[in-house]
């Protein structure tokens, strides 16, 4: 009996050895890929011009791609006739039955055998595999599975794999899903060529794709390492990591060509860096070869359900997507930083498209180093739960162009931060009869533009409706540190705060003037409100209140703290009608009068502190502090009298000098009846 069990175990071990001896495909690593071997692309320049001072361009790479996918790589078919992939188990012949019945291979340790068939056989672990189609036929490589896949198939990947040096080509497969096998978390690595998908909707599901230093795509076209042509690319609970080859990267990270769209959903991530040479971007979309139409076809990118796109260290932009409509929704983020390298534009270029940010989502384009912007967007909307940030960029924070008749909107409750940029935080952009910047900041929006050259700049025919927000601590080397309106329309409501800005030439807080362009004069329109309560001027050694709008022109700058001939404070009276005249204004003060308080007499212990002193505009009015009170019935307070005499006052009108208000406490004696 003992010998029979030994023979059974020997047969089982032989079968397991067969499982471990599957054929291994050698993977050739491409070395020294010659970037210059790819077909050159010409640059088709689209002018994005603000004015004579700030010339801006959006570059589209013309791509020559054959209608049928160009030089498509032919995939080799896998030979699945090998019996090595089959798990053949050898059965022992049990002629006696009873307690000596045959035991299963890999019997669990410690299992107690009983009479009859109590020892049930245990299924061995499933054999590891590289790829399967619809859970059936196995393949030795992902490329082999792709070559045999049909429309609607699902390819399961069972382990970490490295794709061959020729990269991944998927051509004309209709709809194809590449996913992880159940119970696995595989990574697909490419380090030779990247991906080329043509006329196929590809979904990556529950899987990770990593590219390290990929030099080109399989058909060497499009000036990109990954080319997706006429298909939908979906990442579902998946990750794509594209690491360019740094200083030698002269290709885009990924190019969505023609009518290709991309969906990033269900906790997916796209992480791109290192595409920083030859006017390339991390993600690129180009409309130059769409069918000629009055309004070009718009591509789509959606980032949803707690997903993210993060791009760093790219040249032209982190994303140049043109024209594309982008939706960021459901706790999702697009985050672009440190782009615009080596003379590039900046972070995000969506020149002809729109961005919709909703359901606790955000667009972040901070700390980009290009010569133009953190973001240029034709139209943008931010809902009440979401945010937009364009801070710390070397040029503009965000430029908004809009389409004629459309309007970009920052909704009540939204958070918009445009701070510490080298040029204006917000540029309301117009140009070429195509961009008509029209931006609305709703009441209740948490909008800030601080630490920039100009807080907000409006180009000719641009429109700003600012109902709320704070524009402060900006410093221009020319005009309009807070608001620089160059022939546009600005409507500034009472809840918007524009103060404590500075300009080297004129108009610390507001500069509104006509602008000549192409022999046409554009006159400004400015509607604004009186200054708000509680604004304190930062130009003064003491805390002086801001009490009005004052002229702050090139020839005569405001000097409300000056003495004698150095004093200049000419107040501007704000009206309700729009103003088309040139204006250079500062939220400031003129001569101020002091109002102080003094309390005398028998002061009760719970009388409270003496009211604080105040500064009041000369000729203005002042509401006196409430009278002091006590809980002790024997004490009475006289009320406030100017210099302690005359009638009790609750308001002082037309103040022309410093005023002291004196109140007297009296304690009544406790005499008997």
Image (cartoon, grey):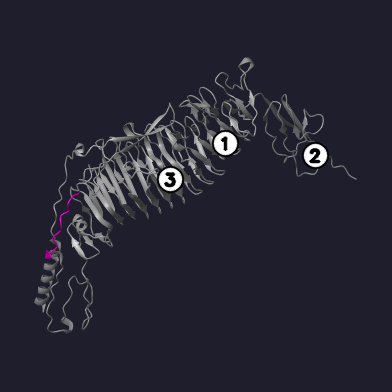
Q: Are marks 1 and 3 in contact (CB under 8 Å)?
A: no
- Label 2 and label 1: CA atoms lie apart by 51 Å
Is the residue marked by circle 2 packed among few (<14), some (14-19), or many (20+) residues within 10 Å? some
Give percent across and percent down for residue 544: 62, 28
Which residue is under mark 2? 636
Q: Residue at x 31, y 32 (%)?
A: 342
Is residue 182 magenta-colored?
no
Q: Residue at x 53, y 41 (%)?
A: 441
Q: Are marks 2 and 1 in contact (CB under 8 Å)?
A: no
Q: Residue at x 24, y 65 (%)?
A: 135
Mark carried by residue 491:
1
Is residue 73 magenta-colored?
yes
Q: Nearer the viewer, mark 2 or mark 1?
A: 1
Pick whichever, 20 or 610, lies toward us.
Answer: 20
What secondary structure is the stretch in magenta mostly built from? loop
Seen in the picture, residue 9 relative to 514 is either above or below; the reply is: below
Range of magenta residues? 72-83
Numbered disc 1: secondary structure: strand
The answer to whether residue 400 shows anywhere in this view is: no
Q: Nearer the viewer, mark 2 or mark 3?
A: 3
Q: Quadrant of the N terminus?
A: bottom left
Give percent across and percent down for residue 385: 49, 49
Give percent across and percent down for residue 574: 64, 31
Pick whichever, 237 or 167, lies toward us.
Answer: 167
Residue furthest to the front in view is 293
Seen in the picture, residue 598 relative to 20 is either above or below; the reply is: above
Tell me which corner region of the image, top left, top right, bottom left or bottom right, holds residue 582. Answer: top right
């Amino acid at each position: 009996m003992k010998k029979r069990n030994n023979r059974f175990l020997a047969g089982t071990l032989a079968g397991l050895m067969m499982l471990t001896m599957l054929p291994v495909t050698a993977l050739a690593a491409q070395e020294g890929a010659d970037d210059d071997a790819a077909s050159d692309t010409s640059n088709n320049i689209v002018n994005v011009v603000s004015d004579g001072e700030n010339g801006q361009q959006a570059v589209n790479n013309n791509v020559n791609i054959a209608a049928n996918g160009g030089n498509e790589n032919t995939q080799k078919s896998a030979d699945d006739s090998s019996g090595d992939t089959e798990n053949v188990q050898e059965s022992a012949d049990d002629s006696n039955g009873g307690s000596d019945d045959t035991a299963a291979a890999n019997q669990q340790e410690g299992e107690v055998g009983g009479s009859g068939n109590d020892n049930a056989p245990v299924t061995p672990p499933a054999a590891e595999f590289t790829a399967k189609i619809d859970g059936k036929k196995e393949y030795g490589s992902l490329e082999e599975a792709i070559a045999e896949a049909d429309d609607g198939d699902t390819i399961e990947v069972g382990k970490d794999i490295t794709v061959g040096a020729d990269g991944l080509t998927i051509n004309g497969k209709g709809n194809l899903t590449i996913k992880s096998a159940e119970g696995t978390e595989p990574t697909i690595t490419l380090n030779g060529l990247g991906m080329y998908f043509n006329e196929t909707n590809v979904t990556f599901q529950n899987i990770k794709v990593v590219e390290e230093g990929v030099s080109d795509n399989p058909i060497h076209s499009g000036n990109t390492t990954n080319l997706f042509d006429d298909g939908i690319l979906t990442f579902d609970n998946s990750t794509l990591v594209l690491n360019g080859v740094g200083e030698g990267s002269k290709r885009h990270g990924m190019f969505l060509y023609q009518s290709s769209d991309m969906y990033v959903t269900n906790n997916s991530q796209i992480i791109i860096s290192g595409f920083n040479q030859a006017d390339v971007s991390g993600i690129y979309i180009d409309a130059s070869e769409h069918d000629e139409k009055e309004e070009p076809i718009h591509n789509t990118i959606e980032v949803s359900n707690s997903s993210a796109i993060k791009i760093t260290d790219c040249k032209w932009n982190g994303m140049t997507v043109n024209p594309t409509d982008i939706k960021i929704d459901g706790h999702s983020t697009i985050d672009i930083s440190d782009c615009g390298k080596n003379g590039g534009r900046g972070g995000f270029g969506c020149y002809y498209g729109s961005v919709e940010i909703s359901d606790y989502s955000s667009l972040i384009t901070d700390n980009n180093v290009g010569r133009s912007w953190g973001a240029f967007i034709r139209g943008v909307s931010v809902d009440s739960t979401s945010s937009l940030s364009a801070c710390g960029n070397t040029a503009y924070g965000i430029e908004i162009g809009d389409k004629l008749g459309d309007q970009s909107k920052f909704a009540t409750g939204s958070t918009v931060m445009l701070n510490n940029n080298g040029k204006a935080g917000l540029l309301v952009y117009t140009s070429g009869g195509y961009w008509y910047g029209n931006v609305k900041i709703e009441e209740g929006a948490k909008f800030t533009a601080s630490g920039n050259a100009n807080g907000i700049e409006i180009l000719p025919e641009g429109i700003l409706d600012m109902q709320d927000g704070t524009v402060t601590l900006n410093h221009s080397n020319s005009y309009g540190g807070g608001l620089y309106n160059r022939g546009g329309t600005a409507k500034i409501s009472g809840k918007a705060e524009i103060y404590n800005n500075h300009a080297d030439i004129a108009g610390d807080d507001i500069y509104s003037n006509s602008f000549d362009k192409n022999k046409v004069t554009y006159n400004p329109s400015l509607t604004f409100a009186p200054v708000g309560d509680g604004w304190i001027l930062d130009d003064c050694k003491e805390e002086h209140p801001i009490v009005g709008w004052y002229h702050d022109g090139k020839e005569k700058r405001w000097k409300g703290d000056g003495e004698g001939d150095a004093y200049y404070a000419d107040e501007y009276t704000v009206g309700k009608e729009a103003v088309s005249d040139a204006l250079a204004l500062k939220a400031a003060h003129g001569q101020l009068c002091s109002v102080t308080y003094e309390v005398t007499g028998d002061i009760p212990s719970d009388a409270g502190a003496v009211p604080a002193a105040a500064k009041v505009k000369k000729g203005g009015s002042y509401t006196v502090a409430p009278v002091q009170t006590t809980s002790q019935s024997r004490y009475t307070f006289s009320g406030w009298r100017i210099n302690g005499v005359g009638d009790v006052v609750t308001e002082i009108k037309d103040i022309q000098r410093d005023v002291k208000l004196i109140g007297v406490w009296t304690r009544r004696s406790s005499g008997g009846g």
